[in-house]
Amino acid sequence: MLTQRSGSARYTRDYYGILAISALARIYERGQEVAIFGSHAPGDVKYRDDLMKSVIGEWTVEVGKRKTGFQVIYANTFDEPVGGLMNVLLTEDGQHYQHASVGEGRSLVIDIGGFTTDWLAVNPGGVVDYGLAKSISIGINQVVADFEESFRSNHIDLVKDIPVLPPARVRQAILTGVFEGGGKKYLCGEYVNEATSLFLNRFADTYQRVAGGALAWDTIILTGGGSALLHKRILPIIKHANVMLADQMDCMHLANVRGGLKLWRLYDAMKLF
């Protein structure tokens, strides 16, 4: 059984490397030379060299009866919240601004992921300020798990033969306070409040204690799939007049990757590779 790793333990050839190359084998029919632009949480920037070393070199992958070879000739990294920022800041080609005013001020990027919530300060010009690069070990997965537990406890007969609640319906219930299933609607706002209380308390504490509240920022950017589910509950805590989403609501989980591609195109155009 594969144990999920965290922190520096992830960035090894037998873990991160294998996962990265397995993904390549599913994207490309034939082996080839590739470059990898890998993302990491802000708190893991000290491990970026380990991340790059874990993928560089030659690989042979077997997918079914097909054997494929890849040679990773170059690797670089970016902070995941920076991907969300760049998805807002840059156009698709990575060479023009689509929201120039964001790049002129000081921004706070908040990335709510599955297991962590990352906070990153960005100075004018898109320069990362690692004086504020914080990850807290709570994310949307715990909210989902707590909601499911509450819903099951209060609807035992309804769910006793259902091992897994439909994930899309759970997410919609967290967003709306109504669970729809079996042709019925079940009010569940109380369960959502219970499930989100721990997260929101820690979020509010980090926002005030670490990020300094609203007055320190010209723009606040929300990214990550968790931001889409919780944004209505987060906005009253943030109390900022210029909050931007890093992508369309139903695509927030892709914002960091899309922004990473734009950043790659910018670096490529500037001959920084």
Image: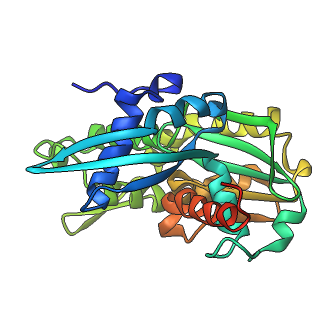
> x, y percentage for residue 70?
33, 48
Q: Determine whether 48 is above or below 9 in the image.
A: below
Give the camera-side residue of 12 and 2.
12
Give the camera-side residue of 184 and 109.
109
Give the camera-side residue of 242 and 57.
57
Give the camera-side residue of 147 and 245.
245
Left or right of residue 66, residue 172 in this image: right
Q: Is residue 245 visible?
A: no
Which quadrant of the figure has residue 79?
top right
Q: Determine whether 249 is above or below 41 in the image.
A: below
- Residue at the spot x=52%, y=40% of the render? 139
> x, y percentage for residue 251?
49, 67
> x, y percentage for residue 188?
40, 53
Left or right of residue 160, residue 204 in this image: right
Which quadrant of the figure has residue 5?
top left
Left or right of residue 103, residue 226 in this image: left
> x, y percentage for residue 48?
60, 34
- Residue at the spot x=46%, y=39% of the render? 56
- Quadrant that contains the C terminus: bottom right
Which quadrant of the figure has residue 272?
bottom right
